[in-house]
Image: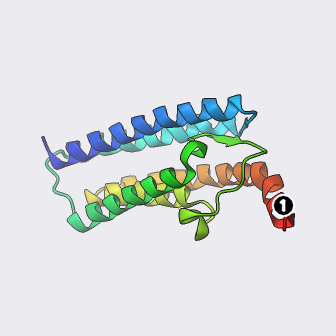
């Protein structure tokens, strides 16, 4: 099996496992009175990630040797991703679910960046294709991701604005 295929299989398995975890958390949050915001753009996000992996699979020759430095950077991004998931715990989901009674998370990577997961995903979408010399895929999907994230972050910020205001007002 080529390095490319091994990496793509690992990424696909990771994403599928995250979807299972996210679905569990989504159900729990909705059962506790949470509500989903921005569901209309969610299929775009899923489609982007699926097509990104498929594009790498279809347009990068399996025997392509990686640039190990960039593959190492991708591995670091995976560790940062785990940090985000561990920090958010039961609040992590691939959808925007707002639970009015939940506190805003301000620990872990959220001490430094407001939306660390989106920053990490942007890095992944850029770095993985570059690691295999596919700069065209990196460029196209990075631009598409930026467009979707512009919508998503606006939705998320609007959804959590009341909680952010309440946090700022509390002593």
Q: How is the image coloured?
A: rainbow
Q: Nearer the viewer, residue 105 or 13?
A: 105
Name the spot of residue 88 as percent of width and height, x first.
57, 51
Comparing 159 with 165, the one in front is: 165
Give the secondary structure at mark 1.
Answer: helix
Q: Quadrant of residue 23?
A: top right
Q: Is residue 51 left or right of residue 64?
A: right
Residue placed most toward the observer, 91 or 60: 91
Given the current orientation, which residue lies at the most extreme bottom position?
A: 112
- Point 54% across, 31% down: residue: 24
Q: Position of residue 140 (x, y in %)?
A: 45, 53
Vertical comparison of 142 with 112: above or below: above
Seen from the viewer's position, the closer of residues 87 and 17 is: 87
Furthest residue to the front?
171
On the image, numbered disc 1 is attached to which residue? 165
Residue 163 is left or right of residue 62, and the answer is right
Q: Is residue 48 above or below residue 128?
A: above
Q: Residue at x 53, y 52 (%)?
A: 145
Quarter containing the C terminus = bottom right
Q: Residues within 10 Å of mark 1 (few under 14, many from 20)?
A: few
Question: How many numbered marks have been drawn onto this rendered protein structure?
Answer: 1
Which quadrant does the N terminus fall into? Answer: top left
x and y, in percent, of residue 143 in the image: 52, 56
For the point 60% across and 49% down, which residue is it?
A: 148
In percent of width and height, residue 11 lies at 33, 44
Residue at position x 65%, y 57% in the image = 105
Does the rendering let one see residue 139?
Answer: no
Q: Is residue 53 found left or right of 117 in the rendered image?
A: left
Q: Check the image and report above or below for 67 versus 21.
A: below
């Amino acid at each position: 099996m080529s390095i490319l295929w091994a990496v793509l299989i690992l990424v696909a398995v990771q994403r599928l496992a995250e979807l299972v975890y996210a679905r569990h958390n989504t159900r729990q949050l909705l059962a506790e009175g949470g509500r989903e915001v921005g569901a209309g753009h969610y299929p775009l996000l899923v489609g982007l990630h699926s097509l990104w992996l498929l594009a790498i699979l279809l347009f990068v020759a399996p025997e392509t040797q990686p640039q190990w430095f960039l593959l190492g950077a991708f591995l670091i991004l995976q560790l940062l991703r785990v940090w985000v998931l561990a920090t958010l715990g039961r609040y992590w989901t691939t959808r925007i679910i707002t639970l009015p009674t939940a506190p805003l998370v301000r620990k872990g990577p959220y001490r430094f960046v407001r939306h660390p997961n989106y920053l990490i995903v942007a890095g992944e979408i850029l770095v993985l294709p570059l690691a295999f010399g596919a700069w065209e895929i990196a460029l196209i999907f990075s631009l598409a991701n930026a467009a979707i994230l512009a919508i998503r972050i606006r939705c998320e910020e609007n959804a959590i604005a009341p909680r952010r205001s309440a946090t700022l007002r509390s002593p």
